[in-house]
Image (tube, helix red, strand yellow):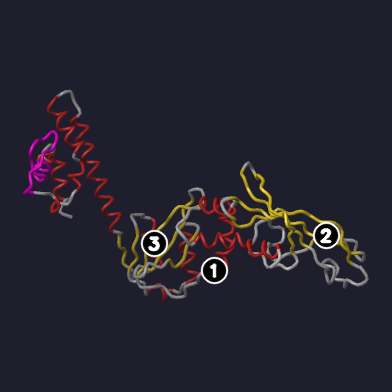
Amino acid sequence: MSYSNSIKSLIDIQDLNITFDEDCVKQGTFKGKACKYITGTLTYNPTHCVKCGIENKNFTVFKNGTQLSRITLPLTGVSPTYLLLRKQRFMCTECNTSFTAKTPIVERNCYISKNVKVQVMIKSAEAQSLKSIAKDCSISPTTVQRVINEVAVHLKPHHTKLPKHLSFDEFKYAKGAMAFEYINVLNGDILDILNRRDNFAIKNHFIVNYSLNDRRNVETVTIDMNAGYVSVIKELFPKAKIIIDRFHLVQLINRSMNKCRISVMNQLRTSDNEDMKKYRRLKRYWKLILKRKSALSSVEYKYYSLFGQRLETSIVEEILAYDPVQKRIMSFIKPF
C-alpha cells in the first residue's frame, strides 16, 4: 500500500482523485489550540463544463490554478485534525467561466466533512450535551445543533396511531427554550417532539396528524402539575382520564412540609432560649419529618444532639408538638 493510500485509510477518505505527499502531516495551531494539518491535492480531468455543459475536447476545459480549503476531519489522536485540500480550478473556453473540482468527502460550500457529521449523529444518540459533542468533533455547539436538525427532518417519525396511554412532558433545549414531547407510557418510547409547548402548537400537531377516532381511543394522559395541559387534553382526547405523575405529587408534598416547618422556625426565632432550642432542633432534624411513618425506628435508642438518648418516633412527635398547625398538617400527610 502506497503512502497516499495509507493516509486515506487513516482518515477514512475513499476519493481516488485526492493524493497525499510523504511530508503531508504537520503540527500547527488553529484558534490558539494545537492541531494537525494534513495537506492533500484534489485534481482530475473533467468530462464537461459544469456551467455550460460543453464536452471537454481539445482542451475546451483546462486547469487553471488551485484553491485551498480547510476541511474539518474527525480527531486523529487527541488533537483536532484539518485537511488542507488544494482543489483544482478549471476554466472553460466556451463560456469563459471557472469552477472548482468536487469531492464526495464534503458538501458544496461546506468545510465540515461528512465523517464529522456522521460522528455528531452517533454521539447525539448518547447522553451527551451539545458542548461535549462539539468538543469531541472540533466544531461549535451551534453547528452540532444545525447538523442534528438537518438530519432530524428526514428521520422524523410519523405515528398514524396513538397508544391508549400517553404521557406529556417538557424539557429545556437551545438556550433555555422549552420543547414538548409525548410518550407511550407502556414502553417508554418517545412518539414525537415539538419545539414549542404552547396550546396552539400542541392542538395543531394532534389535529393535523391524528384523526378524532384515533384520539378518542386514548384512555389516559399522564402529566405533571402544569394546568395548561388540562384544557388541551379535554379538547383533544374526549374520553381520556388525566393522571398527575406521582413524582410531582411527592415533590409537592415535600415542598409543602418544608414550607410549613420553615414557617414554624421563623416564629421560634426569638431571644428566648427555649424557643431557640426548638428552632435548632427543627433545623437539624428536618429529614426525620420527611421520612415515612413506617420507616421511623420505634425500638432502637440512639443519641441525638439537642435531644439525648431517644427514639426516632419520639423525636418526631416532640418536634411536631411545637406547633398545632404543623402537627395537624404533618399527621395528615405523613401516612401517604
- Which amino acid type is marked by label 3? Phe
- Which amino acid type is marked by label 1? Leu
The spot of residue 70 in percent (x, y) is 70, 53
For image coordinates 28% across by 51% down, the residue present is: 251
Q: Residues within 10 Å of mark 1 (few under 14, many from 20)?
A: few
For image coordinates 51% across by 59% down, the residue present is: 123
Camera-side residue of 80 and 285: 80
Camera-side residue of 154 and 196: 154
What segment is highlighted magenta in the picture?
298-317
Does 327 sit above or below residue 112?
above
Q: Which residue is mark 2?
A: 89
Q: Secondary structure at mark 1?
A: helix
- Residue closest to the far left: 299
Q: Secondary structure at mark 3?
A: strand
Tally of marks = 3
Residue 311 in magenta?
yes
Circle nearer the viewer, 2 or 3: 2
Q: Residues within 10 Å of mark 3 (few under 14, many from 20)?
A: some
**What label does residue 155 carry, if any?**
1
| Image side of residue 3 versus residue 90, left or right | left
For image coordinates 11% across by 39% down, the residue present is: 303
Residue 64 in magenta?
no
Give me the C-alpha separation between circle 1 and circle 3.
Answer: 22 Å
Quadrant occupied by the C terminus: bottom left
